[in-house]
Image (tube, grey):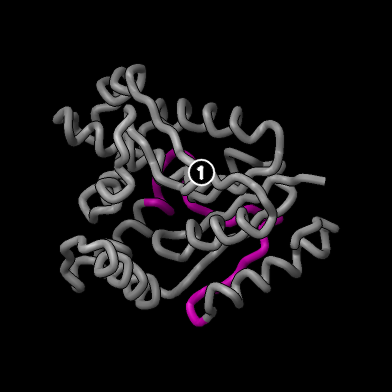
Amino acid sequence: MKINIAIDGPSAAGKSTIAKKCASLLGYSHLDTGAMYRCVTLKAIRENIAFDDEEKLSSMMNNLSISFDSNGNVYLDGEDVSLLIRTNEVSMGASDVSKCLSVREKLVKIQQKIAENKGYILDGRDVGTVILPDAELKIYLIASSKARAERRIKEYKEKNIPFDEKVILEDIEKRDYQDMHREHSPLMKAEDAVEIDSSDLSIDELVNEIKKHLDRLGVHYD
């Protein structure tokens, strides 16, 4: 029996990392919904479109292609932008772009269509509440601002992305506020989601926590 898994939570809580681990464990496909908003943001930057110009953003999306390969690399209009979409500028811009209703509606339809046949793990901020409200397992992953800033710094160092430690922490807290207070599909825990605090957990410990819920649902894994 294949199911769909929704993993929601704030920026840098470890959603994509744990989603990839679970996808590998189950032989499922991982769909990083946040990366899709980042692609829209990057294209808007390149085309000098303001993040709050919903009309132009909506029009731009009619000529936009987003895809993923088996290694998790992200492609925007055929270009590998896996690193380009991880900069702080794009991260903050994605929070603004995601407020646009037409952008959200178009991406949500794509995401729902992809996951129709089950066997998908989606991570984002409104997966369990909006995109896949019928997901069999919903995880709400949280972590302290300090822990998330440290993870983001580690990621930037590994990928040789320039950063300012103070700005990273400020931006994480700012993005939390924006995501939780936006008008459309704000970040929130689904009523039937399992909350896990990843602040002091290793990846293996997180996977073990999720395995407990897979066992409860009778989902097989190796």
Q: Is residue 132 above or below residue 7?
A: above
Residue 173 position within the rendered picture, expressed as x and y whole percent measured from the top left: 32, 65
Q: Residue farthest to the right?
A: 218
Q: Identify the residue at horizontal 33%, vertical 42% (top origin).
A: 38
Whole-percent x, y for residue 65 in the image: 38, 26
210 relative position to 181: left or right: right
* Occupied quadrant, residue 57: top left
Report helix, strand or loop for mark 1.
loop
Query: x, y percentage for residue 84?
Result: 25, 47
Q: Disc 1 marks which amino acid?
A: Ser
What is the magenta segment's predominant secondary structure?
A: loop
Indicate the quadrant containing the C terminus: top left, top right, bottom left or bottom right.
bottom right
Residue at (40% x, 31% y) in the render: 66
Q: Is residue 171 above or below residue 47?
A: below
Q: Quadrant of residue 196?
A: bottom right
Q: How many marks?
A: 1
Identify residue for label 1. 70
In the visual, does 115 lie left or right of 32? right
Q: Which residues are magenta?
A: 179-200
As displayed, is residue 103 above or below residue 87? Answer: above
- Quadrant of the rendered image containing residue 207: bottom right
In this image, 165 relative to 65: left or right? left
Label 1 environment density (alpha carbons within 10 Å; few <14, some 14–19, many ≥20) = few
Across and down, in percent, residue 89 comes to: 21, 51
Going 53% across and 46% down the picture, which residue do you hit?
Answer: 126
Query: Is residue 50 or residue 164 the one in the foreground?
Result: 164
Position of 86 with respect to 24 (left or right) is left
In the rendered image, residue 13 lying in the magenta stretch gets the answer: no
Residue visible at 31% across and 63% down? Answer: 172
